[in-house]
Image: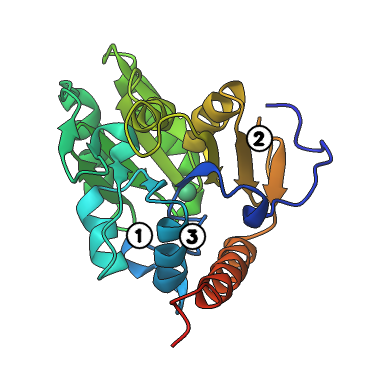
Amino acid sequence: MKNADRASTPFKLLEWLDCALFLDFDGTLVDLAPTPDAVAVAPGLVDALRVIRDRLDGRLAIVSGRPIAQIDAMLATLTLPMAGVHGMERRDADGMLHYAPVPSFSTVQECALYLATRDPRLRVEQKRGALALHYRQAPELEHLCKAEMLAAIRETPGMLLLHGKMVIEVKPAGVTKGTAIRDFLAEAPFIGSRPVFAGDDTTDEVGFAYVQQAGGLALKVGEGASVARHRIATPQALRAELAHAAHTLSAAMAKMPGKNE
Ligand SMILES: [Mg+2]
């Protein structure tokens, strides 16, 4: 993860219309907010995603640490193929749900809940087979949270602890955003396409590495060290790129014979 300064050409989705597009959600499609509940989907984003999904013949999926149900609620009328909880749950293009086996990690759960009991500014997100401890409201507790959670995870083989943006994520080591993208790429309509994956945080790095190794493109949103060879400044800039692509594609569709009445 040492190539943060590597120069790269700007990412243009219109140059990748043969790709399979995988998008993280928080910090990538939506701006980060003080709490996970407080994020807002920007006007026009759902419409842009719908146009792009259609133009890519369905090869668009969300790959997030959130549960699928949360993102479904925020995308309202748009139902996409989706990996949730870092790949622990996955909805394929046919709408079928796939669930990875849930490990036992009660020591870690109890540790996080105990910390949150001691300081209500800490927030524990319990997910299926994973957990997130958010300390964005109490950043001075970062060291304490990391130390306590590291001690707990040492007693929990098979689980991985990742430091994200004001959050400590705990998840099974063998299930990642990379394995989720791999599984999508083994199925229609994604199969055979070059993967593009955009993400912003630590848990996206394994996905970046996977798509680059598969001949695709990794797009890091924002600053910070990353294995990704392409970068875009902010979620807002990514949304602008998606909106531009959607607008251009819509205009091209409108000019097609039989589509212009
Ligand atoms: Mg993110």
Q: Residues within 10 Å of mark 3 (few under 14, many from 20)?
A: many
Of marks 3 and 2, which one's residue comes earlier in the chain? Answer: 3
**Is 50 situated left or right of 118 in this image?**
right
Please tell me which residue lies in front, 14 or 29.
Answer: 14
Would residue 233 be visible to someone looking at this image? yes
The residue type indicated by label 3 comes to Leu
Q: Residues within 10 Å of mark 1 (few under 14, many from 20)?
A: some
Query: Could you say which disc has been placed on residue 29 in the image?
Result: 3
The residue type indicated by label 2 comes to Ala
**Residue 156 placed where, x, y %?**
26, 15
Location of mark 2 (residue): 228
Query: Could you say which disc has been placed on residue 154 in the image?
Result: none
**Residue 227 placed where, x, y %?**
66, 30
Q: Residues within 10 Å of mark 2 (few under 14, many from 20)?
A: many
Of marks 1 and 3, which one's residue comes earlier in the chain? Answer: 3
Residue at 55% from the left image edge and 43% from the top image edge:
18
Query: Could you say which disc has been placed on residue 36 in the image?
Result: 1
Q: Are marks 1 and 2 in contact (CB under 8 Å)?
A: no
Residue at 81% from the left image edge and 38% from the top image edge:
5
Give the Cα distance between marks 1 and 2: 25 Å
The mark lying in front, picked from 1 and 2, is: 2
The residue type indicated by label 1 comes to Pro
Residue at 70% from the left image edge and 47% from the top image edge:
231
